Amino acid sequence: MITSLVTGGAGFIGSHVAKHCMESGHKVIVLDDLSGGFEDHLPEGCIFIKGTITDHLLLEDLFNEYQFDYVYHLAAYAAEGLSHFIRRFNYTNNLIGSVNLINEAVKHKVRCFVFTSSIAVYGAGQLPMTEDMTPMPEDPYGVSKFAVEQDLKAAHEMFGLNYVIFRPHNVYGENQNIGDKYRNVIGIFMNQIMQGKSLTIFGDGTQTRAFSYIDDVAIPISKCVDVPEAYNEVFNVGADKPYSVNELAEIVCESFGVDKKINHLKARNEVLHAYADHSKVNKLFPPKGISLKEGILRMSNWAKSVGVRKSQEFGEIEIYEKLPEGWNISEKVNS
């Protein structure tokens, strides 16, 4: 039997990847510290280990015990905007933790290492984003993701470790952590609506993103190990059509049958427009083609069934200067 490790498998994308791997006959071991995931997201029949990828001794034990064929690495702290203010935490979890995994994958001759990167590696001003562009990340999150990509390429050249890299963007759907106030605008909107609150939008809402339904992302990630043409390649993955945040707010409110009420906050430092080209990935993994309205409706039905999630405060802010409005955790000021 094929044995696969899915890091972050109690989280949003990871839980879907774990499910699709199990449907393909894999024995799945999920490693997750539950900092952003939930045990009720775990697919039935998987083996769950609570722990973190920063614990290299734990990883050594897991690789020795299970002799993984494949590693699907989705564990990360993915609050891109917050990464400016948690630089040490960001690099420890998103870079050093990934290197711990790569070390074990090399030592144990893993057949393929599947890494979920991000279009954050591109930075601003490169539209549409294509895989042949030179990455120019503009925040610590994007820097950490691109560093892992480079390390995987180095490990392949030195040790023959096969990899597949996916760069998803603005993914939404069932199992998303709607209680996270630092990321995932669709989940934030839904959580606010269910609490009777106004929707909060940074700036004037004209910033655009191509919001990607989970099936168009998780299925290619899970299936790629069976596609030799995908090995040692990088793929953008997600939806093609960009929408403004204002348009998104209309669709989300419509799915809940409520009038749109907006509270505009001060604009934060972020890329104004971001969308990618997916012609490369679509040749190997044809998209499901679920429209934004249909995907939002599916997610809203799920959100109504699980109810309001409590917003999580990130308690390890390292830099308070220029922290965006609404993200303040205390009155603490760095000396």
Image (cartoon, rainbow, N blue to C red):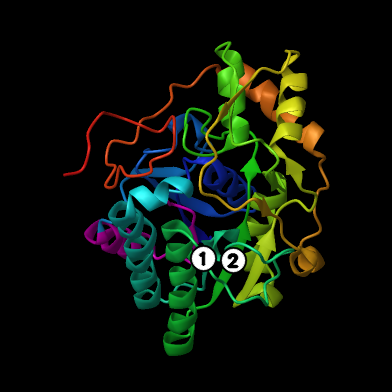
Q: Where is 267 relative to 283, above or below?
A: above
Residue at position x 51%, y 48% in the image = 269
Q: Where is 141 relative to 81, above or below?
A: below
Residue at position x 58%, y 67% in the image = 165
Q: Where is 110 relative to 98, above or below?
A: below
Residue at position x 81%, y 68% in the image = 283
Amino acid type at mark 1: Pro
Q: Is mark 2 on a helix, strand or loop?
A: loop
Q: Which circle marks residue 122 in the picture?
A: 2
Q: Give the range drawn in magenta.
A: 56-76
Circle nearer the N terminus (1, 2): 2
Does the stretch in magenta take in 60? Answer: yes
Q: What element carries label 1?
A: loop
Is residue 297 visible in the rendered structure shown here? Answer: no
Is residue 112 visible in the rendered structure shown here? Answer: yes
Q: In this view, does 41 lie to the left or right of 20?
A: left
Residue 58: which quarter of the image? Answer: bottom left
Where residue 229 appears, as percent x and y from the top left, is 70, 77
Q: Is residue 257 left or right of residue 192?
A: right
Where residue 189 appears, as percent x and y from the top left, is 61, 26
Q: Is residue 97 left or right of residue 251?
A: left
The answer to the question of whether label 1 and label 2 lie on touching residues, with beta carbons closer than 8 A, is yes
Q: Which circle marks residue 137 in the picture?
A: 1
Does the stretch in magenta take in 191? Answer: no
